[in-house]
Image: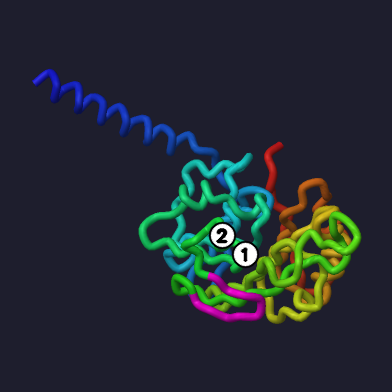
């Protein structure tokens, strides 16, 4: 009897600790955008990592554990990886966010580290976990670690356009202002990178945004850059709303 009482006490203590952890998890600012398929909830996490909730599905983008707080966040129905670099691809975090039935989508270059990934190449259109998407090329035109080399080679990584109800959401991935980026159309929500030396300056990113005019644009992946420069450069651009959010701890 005493043994049963001790076991029950341990279970209750564990349950209480889980409840307390949930209660004390930091609040996470999120944006909610109305779509024809219901609300789209957007939660910035850190750098390039974010979470989307739509149609009963949880989508994690570039989940990376180092320095990021995933406390209390749900596991994924769909995980999207844009590139092989460690600020986008984290095997351990993917494993933490996976559950039975989770679909991981990545460029082919990620298959070595993520054997279970389903792949999509630049320019392809596919549907995964009920979400229609298109892969957009992301790459450097000029910048690289040394002459003749680029930080991001064309064809290795993916930007993505997701169709969520009547909204089209664009994730630029790590890129400069490429012809493919300029050519995206009818974008309702965009996440655009900016940081040197790897991608673009805030001004370059703003100039690129002006070419395809997303209705709402979030600067992200901006460590070391000032997103307010991006917002200032787009000020007065008709039909474009810039949303600067917290992507890094203080």
* Secondary structure found at label 1: helix
Q: Which class describes the residues within 10 Å of circle 1: few (<14), some (14-19), or many (20+)?
A: some
Residue 210 visible: yes
Q: Hey, which quadrant is residue 144 in on the image? A: bottom right
Q: Residue furthest right?
A: 147
Percent position of residue 43, x then y: 58, 54
How many numbered callouts?
A: 2
- The label number, if any, that marks residue 112 in the structure image: 2
Q: In the picture shown, does residue 157 fall above or below 186?
A: above
Q: In the picture shown, does residue 69 fall above or below 11?
A: below
- The label number, if any, that marks residue 5 in the structure image: none
* Secondary structure found at label 2: loop
Task: Please check the rendered image and state whether residue 106 is part of the magenta-colored stretch, yes or no.
Answer: no
Percent position of residue 3, x then y: 14, 21
For the point 71% across and 66% down, which residue is it? 172
Residue 30 visible: no
Q: Are marks 1 and 2 in contact (CB under 8 Å)?
A: yes
- List the residue tagged with mark 1: 109
Specify the quadrant that holds the C terminus: top right
**Range covered by the magenta-colored residues:** 119-127
For the point 80% across and 70% down, which residue is it? 209
State the separation of the CA atoms marked 1 and 2: 7 Å
For the point 58% across and 81% down, which residue is it? 125
In this rendering, would 69 be left or right of 76?
Answer: right
Percent position of residue 215, x then y: 71, 72
């Amino acid at each position: 009897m005493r043994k049963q009482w001790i076991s029950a006490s341990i279970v209750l203590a564990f349950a209480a600790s889980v409840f307390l952890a949930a209660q004390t998890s930091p609040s996470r600012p999120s944006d909610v955008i109305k779509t024809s398929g219901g609300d789209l909830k957007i939660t910035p996490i850190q750098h390039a990592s974010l979470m989307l909730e739509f149609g009963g599905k949880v989508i994690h983008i570039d989940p990376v554990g180092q320095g990021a707080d995933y406390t209390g966040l749900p596991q994924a129905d769909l995980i999207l990886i844009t590139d092989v670099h460690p600020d986008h691809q984290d095997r351990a975090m993917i494993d933490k966010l996976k559950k039975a039935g989770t679909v991981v989508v990545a460029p082919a270059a990620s298959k070595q580290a993520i054997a279970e990934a389903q792949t999509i190449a630049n320019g392809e259109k596919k549907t995964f976990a009920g979400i229609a998407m298109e892969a957009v090329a992301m790459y450097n035109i000029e910048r690289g670690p040394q002459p003749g080399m680029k930080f991001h080679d064309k064809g290795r990584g993916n930007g993505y356009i997701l169709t969520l109800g009547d909204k089209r959401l664009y994730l630029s991935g790590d890129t400069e202002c490429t012809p493919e980026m300029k050519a995206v159309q009818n974008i309702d929500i965009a996440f655009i990178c900016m940081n040197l030396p790897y991608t673009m300056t805030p001004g370059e990113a703003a100039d690129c945004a002006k070419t395809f005019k997303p209705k709402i644009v979030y600067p992200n992946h901006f460590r070391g850059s000032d997103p307010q420069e991006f917002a200032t450069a787009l000020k007065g651009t008709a039909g474009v709303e810039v949303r600067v959010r917290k992507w890094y701890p203080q």
